Amino acid sequence: MAWIKVPPENHPIFYDALPKSPRGETHKMFGGIAAKVNGHVFAGLFGRSTMVLLAEPDRAAALALEGAAPFDPMGDGRARSEKVMLPESMMDDLEELRRWIARAFESTAALPKKAKKADKGKKAKKAKKVTKAKKVKKARA
């Protein structure tokens, strides 16, 4: 799958389709928008359409839609098992897009909160300081 830039006109459509919940948050990601709940991405703009994280049986229903496919962002055949790329035509049907994103939000909101990862930048700086301190001690010895 060749990289396709997210059309800018899809941004307001996506924002409008998101659930109006204080638990949801959005972030810019790879030229698009990712929506999260409990630290998990439940929907996002990718290429000319929207990716949603769905539990069964919603995932099977979404994959049955004409033009839907398993989410394979690299196009290498390694699809993300619970994520579905909705048909491009979904971007023209706001109500239907809302329904699918709401399903993704609800199933993802039921997942346990994702643990926050430690800040790699701070760890790397700390490790660098420790390494430098060890080198200075060795040089003095």
Image (tube, rainbow, N blue to C red):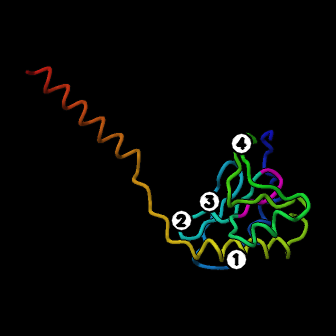
Residue that numbered label 1 is attached to: 19
- Is 114 displayed left or right of 67 in the figure? left
Tell me the SS state at disc 1: loop
User: Which quadrant would residue 105 be assigned to in this image?
Assistant: bottom right
Image depth: mark 3 or mark 4 in front: 4
Question: Which x, y percent locates residue 14?
Answer: 77, 65
- Residue 49 painted magenta: yes
Image vertical order of residue 97 relative to residue 124, above or below: below
C-alpha gap between disc 2 and disc 3:
11 Å
Q: Earlier in the sequence, mark 3 or mark 1?
A: 1
Please, what is the three-letter code of the amino acid marked with disc 4? Met
Depth check: give the residue in front, 16 or 97: 97
**Magenta segment main secondary structure:** strand
Residue that numbered label 4 is attached to: 74
Residue that numbered label 2 is attached to: 39
Question: Which x, y percent locates residue 113?
Answer: 49, 70
Q: Earlier in the sequence, mark 3 or mark 4?
A: 3
Residue at the farthest bottom position: 21
Which residue is at a point 85% across and 72% down the rendered structure image?
A: 94
Please say if the residues under marks 3 and 4 sit with CB atoms less than 8 Å apart. no
Please, what is the three-letter code of the amino acid marked with disc 1? Pro
Depth check: give the residue in front, 9 or 95: 95
User: Which quadrant would residue 84 be assigned to in this image?
Assistant: bottom right
